[in-house]
Image: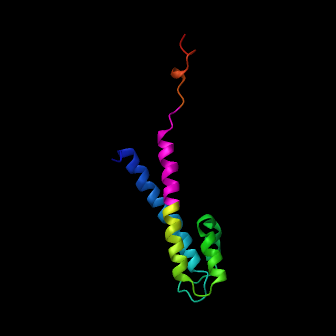
């Protein structure tokens, strides 16, 4: 059973991953001249999202018509990035704040 704090990190990581990987996917689709999203400014988006776009970027420059392959890889990267961000947010919630009262020498 998922706790309330975990559901907040779960949904927050979903939103962060969806925005980041989605922006990277649209940037990848904008590279090809046959794509309806073609624009030269999308190279900036690819460089911002390079950690999740690296494999798709390499496939686009090696294969000619590989949009489906890039979409499948981006879906896999979305789930991997989502798990990564969820792990970071979940561990961040578990860390306790430093408290001087927990020290043995304090208050004696």
Question: Would you say the magenta stretch is mainly helix, strand or loop?
Answer: helix
Q: Decide: is 89 above or below 60.
A: above
Q: Decide: is 73 above or below 95.
A: below
Report which quarter residue 27 is drawn in: bottom right
Quadrant location, the C terminus: top right
Residue 66, image x, y percentages:
57, 83
Residue 61, image x, y percentages:
66, 81
Residue 36, image x, y percentages:
53, 86
Q: How is the image coloured?
A: rainbow
Q: Decide: is 102 above or below 107.
A: below
Query: Image check: 86 left or right of 54?
Result: left
Residue at 44% across / 59% down in the picture?
A: 14
Residue at 35% across / 48% down in the picture?
A: 2
Which one is nearer the viewer's eye here, 73 or 42?
73
In this figure, what is the number of numbered marks? 0
Q: Decide: is 66 above or below 80.
A: below
Q: Which residues are magenta?
A: 81-97
Residue at 44% across / 55% down in the picture?
A: 12
- Residue that sits furthest to the top in the current view: 108
Residue at 38% across / 50% down in the picture?
A: 7
């Amino acid at each position: 059973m998922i706790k309330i704090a975990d559901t907040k990190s779960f949904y927050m990581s979903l939103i962060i991953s969806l925005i980041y990987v989605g922006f990277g996917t649209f940037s990848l689709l904008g590279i090809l001249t046959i794509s309806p999203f073609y624009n030269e400014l999308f190279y900036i988006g690819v460089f911002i999202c390079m950690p999740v776009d690296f494999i798709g970027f390499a496939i686009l420059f090696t294969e000619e018509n590989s949009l489906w392959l890039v979409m499948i890889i981006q879906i896999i990267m979305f789930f991997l990035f989502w798990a990564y961000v969820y792990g970071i947010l979940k561990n961040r919630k578990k860390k306790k704040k430093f408290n001087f009262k927990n020290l043995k020498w304090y208050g004696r």
